[in-house]
Image: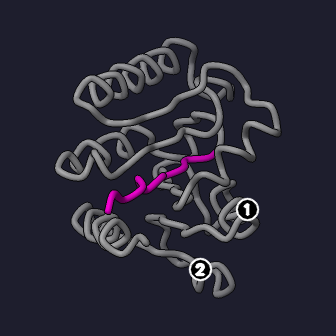
Amino acid sequence: RKRKKIVIGIPGSIDPLKKDYLKILKLIGKLNELKKNIKVYFIGHFQSNTSTYTKQKENYYFLKFKKELNKLKKDGFDIVLFKKKLSQKLYQKCVKECDIMYAHLNFRTYKPSEGNAWTSAYTEGITYNKIILTNRKNSPKDIDAIELKYTTDEEFYKIIRFIINNKH
């Protein structure tokens, strides 16, 4: 029986301050032996948020992100990245296709303990009854109960393997 791919959704615009997108690509790249079982959606659009980075640093980050993403695609990973803002209808369609809402937070610049703790991965995960995968620590109790958390790369890989092996 042929299994459907696990679809990992990373909602929100590509913003280096809130999520560590280079680390996300690194983690996905390490799933090489599972790439035929995975599809990744960056459900937002490329370089759509302005940040406090200077334009030069911002351009460097996004160029590096795109280079790494294209390398993974060339290696056979099924990755979708939108270049324009999605309509609400397309955004919801993409979210509904996902099995997992994923947020690898950038703790160097994003401080969930300082009140800015919510990301679209939680909103979409709750709204559409999706698995929420995160590296977040010290979640509030109501959020903690619905997350699959990892603190190491190996824990991330184990969770993804578990989900793939138990997909119906």
Instruction: Return the residue nearer the eye: 92 or 150.
Output: 92
Residue under numbered circle 2: 146
* Residue at horizontal 48 percent and vertical 73 percent from the top: 137
Which image quadrant for residue 140?
Answer: bottom right
Of the 4 image quadrants, the one containing the C terminus is: bottom left
Mark 2 and mark 1: Cα distance apart in space: 12 Å
Q: Which mark is residue 10?
A: none
Q: Which mark is residue 123?
A: 1
What percent of the width, then of the height, locates residue 15?
58, 35
Instruction: Return the residue nearer the eye: 89 or 146.
Output: 89
Please say if the residues under marks 2 and 1 sit with CB atoms less than 8 Å apart.
no
Q: Amino acid at mark 1?
A: Thr
**Callout 1: 10 Å neighbours few (<14), some, many (20+)?**
some
* Residue at horizontal 50 percent and vertical 32 percent from the top: 80
What percent of the width, then of the height, locates residue 22?
37, 37
Q: Amino acid at mark 2?
A: Ile
Find the magenta span and give its range.
Answer: 1-11
**Callout 2: 10 Å neighbours few (<14), some, many (20+)?**
some
Give whichever of discs 2 and 1 has the lower sequence position: 1
Q: Secondary structure at mark 2?
A: loop
Which image quadrant for residue 53?
Answer: top right
